[in-house]
Amino acid sequence: MRTLSSTQRMLLDIQGFGEVDDATLARTQGWLRFAPALCALVAALGTALASPWTLWALAAIAAAGAALPFHPFDLAYRAGVRRFSAGPPLPENRAPRRFACALASGWLVVTGALFTGGYDVAGYVLGASLVAVATLVATTHVCIPSIIFRTACGQMPSLLRARV
């Protein structure tokens, strides 16, 4: 049986998974990293190629992740991994994680526009910083946009307040 550390639990709470039981999160926490990892990969490709169309396509996917209770990339887990592994369903994305998707969507639109306008250096800087933020979520569950959302709403989990 997999378990979550108190730090992992806190980081997942910040992303809005506070009402999900520990056993489910322990079994799915790795798959909750998949969508941010794939976003980081596609954003890195779009940035490296200075491809506005790649970035805008990813922006549309991120916007869907903001509007829906799941990220479109989570469908790979649903259709493939879960079907063959009998894993639990992924928990729904709550407001903090959906805010992160909305922020990423706007960030990607602006990055693509910078490349279109010939502001390549600014596009590379903005694109690389988005890749860094998405990679941080994918590797550690530290989600800066979710932290911003929770702080702005005065909803930081008690675990974090106790540590600060």
Image: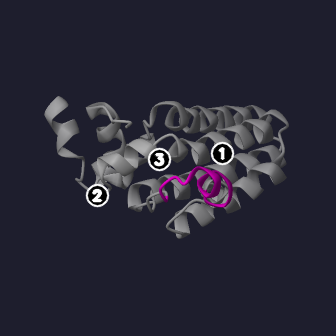
Q: Residue at x 42, y 36 (%)?
A: 142
Query: Which residue position is annotated with label 2?
Result: 19
The residue type indicated by label 2 comes to Glu
49 lies left or right of 86:
right
Main secondary structure of the magenta stretch: helix
**Figure label count:** 3
Rendering quarter of residue 19: bottom left
Query: Which residue position is annotated with label 1?
Result: 39
- Tell whether position 146 is magenta: no
Question: What is the basis of the colouring in this image?
Answer: one colour
Mark-to-mark CA distance, 2 and 1? 25 Å
Nearest to viewer (mark 2 / mark 1): 2
Q: Residue at x 49, y 52 (%)?
A: 100
Instruction: Give the crowd class for mark 3: few <14, some 14-19, many >=20 residues within 10 Å.
Output: some
The residue type indicated by label 1 comes to Cys
Q: Element type at marker 1? A: helix
- The label shown at residue 28 is 3
Residue 132 sits above or below residue 25 on the image: above
- Tell whether position 87 is magenta: yes
Magenta span of residues: 78-89
The residue nearer to you, when weighing 52 against 33, is 33
Nearest to viewer (mark 2 / mark 3): 3
- The label shown at residue 53 is none
The residue type indicated by label 3 comes to Thr
Q: Which part of the image, by quadrant, shows the N terminus?
A: top left
Mark-to-mark CA distance, 2 and 3? 14 Å
Is tag 2's residue or tag 1's residue first in the polypeptide sequence?
2
